[in-house]
Amino acid sequence: MKKIYPILFILISNYIIGQINSPKYSNEFLNIGVGARSLAMSNSVITSTQGAMAGYWNPANLANMKKDIQIGLMHAEYFAGIAKYDFGSIVKKLDDKSSFGFSFIRFGVDNIPNTTELIDAQGNINYDRITYFSAADLAFIGSYGKKVNDYLSVGGSVKIINRKAGDFAKAWGFGIDISSTYKKNDWGIAIVAKDVTSTFNVWNYELSNEMINTFNSTGNELPENGLELTLPRVILGVFKNYEFEKNVHLLIEFNSDITTDGRRNVLISGNPFSIDPHIGAEFNIRDLVFLRGGFGNIQKTPDLTGKMIYTIQPNLGLGINIKGVEIEYALTDIGDASIAEYSNIFSLKFNLNPE
C-alpha cells in the first residue's frame, strides 16, 4: 500500500493544479484514435490491439509483438479535406518479453491566409500583403512494453508535443502514459492511464506590430505566454474471444473512457469526472479476413422539436491480411465533426522481416 500513496498524491496534486489553468479538451488531437481497425470498432481496442498501433493505444501490448519489425501508417481527412490527420509508427521486438515502438502524429490545416496585414499604414487594401501559414499539432511518442509473466504485461509511453500556428504561436509539451494488460484463456482486461502526471504545453507568442495593431483595433484580446495542462484520462477495457470452430473467432471488446477535466457531453456526464463507454466487435476468419463494427460517441442532443434525445454513432470496417501485409478499412464519421456524414479511412501494417 505504501507504494500507492505517491501515485495518489501526484494524481490529486495534478488535478488541483489543473483546475486552475487547464482548459477542457487540451491536446484533444491525441484522443482521435489511429488505425482503421480501431475506428471501425469505435476505439474499443485497448485490450486487443497488437503490433504497430499498440504504442498509441496500449504500450503494454507491445510485449506481445510476434514479428521482428512492423510499420503502421494511416491518413485521414476532416472537413472535406481541409484538415489532414496522419499517423506513422514502427515497432521493434527486442526479445521474447519486450518490444519498443516509436509513433508520430500530425493533425493540421495548411495554406491558411493571414489577412492581419491586409491593410497598410495608409489604410489601403493590398492583397499582396496576404501570406499563408499552417496550424498543426504534432506528437512524437516513444513506447515500451514488457511481459511480467505469461499473463501480465506492463508498458509506458513518453510524449513530446509540438503545436504551432505559423511563426506567431508555438508550444512545446511533455507527457507520460502508463498501462497494463492481463490476458488468460479467452479473456483480457486492460487499463491505460494517459497524461498520468498531467501533460503540459508551454505557449510562446511572437506577434508583429501590425498583428498587435489589428488585434487592438478589432477588440480582440492579445494572447499571452503561458502554461496549458492536460489532465489525466483513464481508459478501462475488457474483451472476450469466442471460438466457433478452428480459426474462426469473434472478439467483443468493451472500453470506457474516464476523463477528469469536467463535464462532457457523454453518456455519464459529471464534474469533474465524465464516463464515455463504447463497444466494438471483430469477426476473424483464419486470420485472413476480418469483419468489424462498433458503437460509440453517445451524446445527448436536441431533436427537431427541441426534445433532448441520446444519439449513437455506428461504425463498420473490413480487414485483409495478405502474406503479412494488413490492409484495414473503416467507414466512420471521424470525430463526428466532419461535413460529410461518413468517411472512408484506410490504414496499413506490414512487416519488414517477415518469417
Image (cartoon, helix red, strand yellow):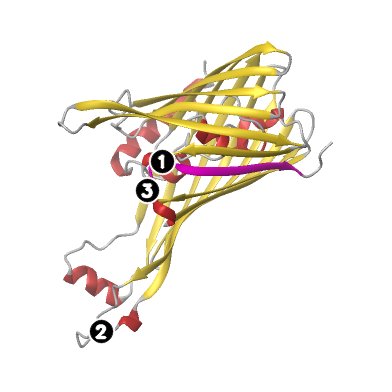
- The answer to whether residue 213 is magenta is no
Name above or below for residue 286 compared with residue 332: above
Q: Mark 2 against mark 1, which lies toward the viewer?
A: 1
What is the x, y in percent for residue 310? Answer: 28, 25
Extreme residue in the bottom direction: 122
Element type at mark 2: loop
Give the alpha-carbon distance from disc 2 to disc 1, as whole Å. 40 Å
Q: Which residue is mark 1?
A: 335
Extreme residue in the right direction: 355
Residue type marked 2:
Asp
Q: Quadrant of the C terminus?
A: top right
- Position of 267 with respect to 278 (left or right) is left
Residue 98 vs residue 134, the one in the foreground = 134
Residue type marked 1:
Gly
Element type at mark 3: strand
First along the sequence among labels 3 and 1: 3
How many numbered callouts?
3
- Which residue is pictured at 34% across the width and 77% down the height? 130
Give the alpha-carbon distance from disc 3 to disc 2, as whole Å. 34 Å
Give the alpha-carbon distance from disc 3 to disc 1, as whole Å. 23 Å
Residue type marked 3:
Glu
Name above or below for residue 279 compared with residue 37: above
The mark found on residue 89 in the picture is: none
What is the x, y in percent for residue 221? Answer: 22, 61
- Which residue is pictured at 57% across the width and 42% down the height? 158
At label 1, counting other C-alpha atoms closer than 10 Å, the crowd grade (few under 14, some 14-19, many 20 or more) is: few
Which span is picked out in magenta? 340-351
- Which residue is pictured at 79% across the width and 33% down the height? 95
- Does residue 23 show up? yes
- The answer to whether residue 343 is magenta is yes
Q: Which residue is mark 3?
A: 228
The mark found on residue 120 in the picture is: 2
